[in-house]
Image: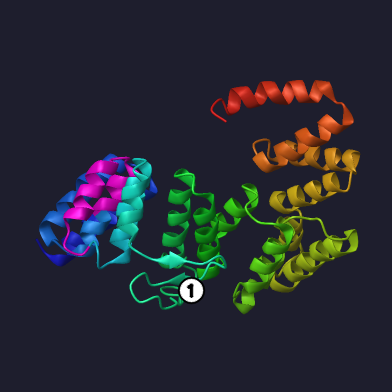
Amino acid sequence: MREEEIEKIRGVVRDCVSKHLYSSAIFFADKVAALTNDPADIYMQAQALFLGRHYRRAFHLLNASKIVLRDLRFRYLAAKCLEELKEWDQCLLMLGDAKVDEDGNVYDAKDGNLIYFDKDGEDREINISSAICFLRGKAYGALQNRSQARQWYKAAIKADPLCYEALECLIESHMLTSEEESNLLSSLQFSPEDGWLSSFYSCLIKKYDKESTVEARFKKLENEISGSVSGSSMISTLVNNTDLLACKAEYYHQCCQYQKCFELTSGLLEKDPFHLKCTLVHLAAAMELGNSNELYLMACNLVKDYPSK
């Protein structure tokens, strides 16, 4: 089969994935990999299997390849399969040996040298090493090793500040003190165009500083957005972003401004009724205000919409 014909089938695989037709993607990816035996095509087949929830088969395919321990993408995807299978110890083994200190600095397990994570690949790609650190954190968290989980989450976001999930886990699981959160943010290396992200992260962390300090964070973020985004409508959209306003509502709650908090979260939940962080702050404000009707209605909806939480 000619190369252009094979490339056409690769295009079909990518299109099937984008349309969530995973069985079709698996079928065609298998044929391409059989024709070429190219590592990139084997990886594409494994991705299709993973997306189709065939985790054991995807892991077998990756593990059988000669390059699984040489190519970080193969190793990471194999470890993701083990994550889905809840085989956490095997997941850590697949990710390889490395040590991390309390500050999130990663060291080679063999020679003890500090490992520096350069931003690889395209500018808007998450560093694969950051993703690996994050997965190590999830594995240790699942194994109830909270200390190691915290250190690897810190390593993940230090390796790449765009790895928001690592920061989210640290904040939502209350793994850091207010001072530790501030120190971590100040250690992150943001690119010049990501100044707005640095300011956004500063609004997510604990808000135990003086009111003027916290207000200044929100103001700085609004200025960063205004400076980096053109068009007044886009600026207005970002300033009124649900995540940002949920942080503001949380701040109002911590300041005991419960009515103000409740009014803000009520408006946000009309726009995005399934925003969980906003929902939690809304419930807390309703509790403080003694709004039993709202609590009952929210409870009924939560049981229906999130039965496993």
Helix, strand or loop: magenta stretch: helix
Measured from the top left, where is residue 97 in percent x and y?
34, 64
Q: Which residues are magenta?
A: 45-67
- Give the vertical position of 204 relative to 110 (above or below): above
Q: Quadrant of the C terminus?
A: top right
Q: In this rendering, would 255 be left or right of 155?
A: right
Q: Is residue 226 magenta?
A: no
Q: Quadrant of the N terminus?
A: bottom left
Question: What secondary structure is marked by label 1?
Answer: loop
Question: Quick check: can you spot residue 204?
Answer: yes
- Give the vertical position of 54 relative to 193 (above or below): above
Which residue sits at x=41%, y=78%? 113
- Give the vertical position of 112 relative to 253 (above or below): below
Q: In this rendering, would 79 be left or right of 138?
A: left
Which residue sits at x=78%, y=40%? 265
Which residue sits at x=76%, y=53%? 240
Measured from the top left, where is residue 92 in percent x and y?
36, 54
Q: Nearer the viewer, residue 281 or 9?
A: 281
Measured from the top left, where is residue 244 in percent x and y?
73, 54
Q: Is residue 47 magenta?
A: yes
Which residue does the numbered mark 1 point to in the structure image? 123
Q: In this rendering, would 94 be left or right of 216?
A: left
Amino acid on which the number 1 mark rests in the picture: Asp
What scheme was used to colour the molecule?
rainbow
Within 10 Å of disc 1 (Cα), the crowding (few <14, some 14-19, many 20+) is: few
Question: Quick check: can you spot residue 20?
Answer: no
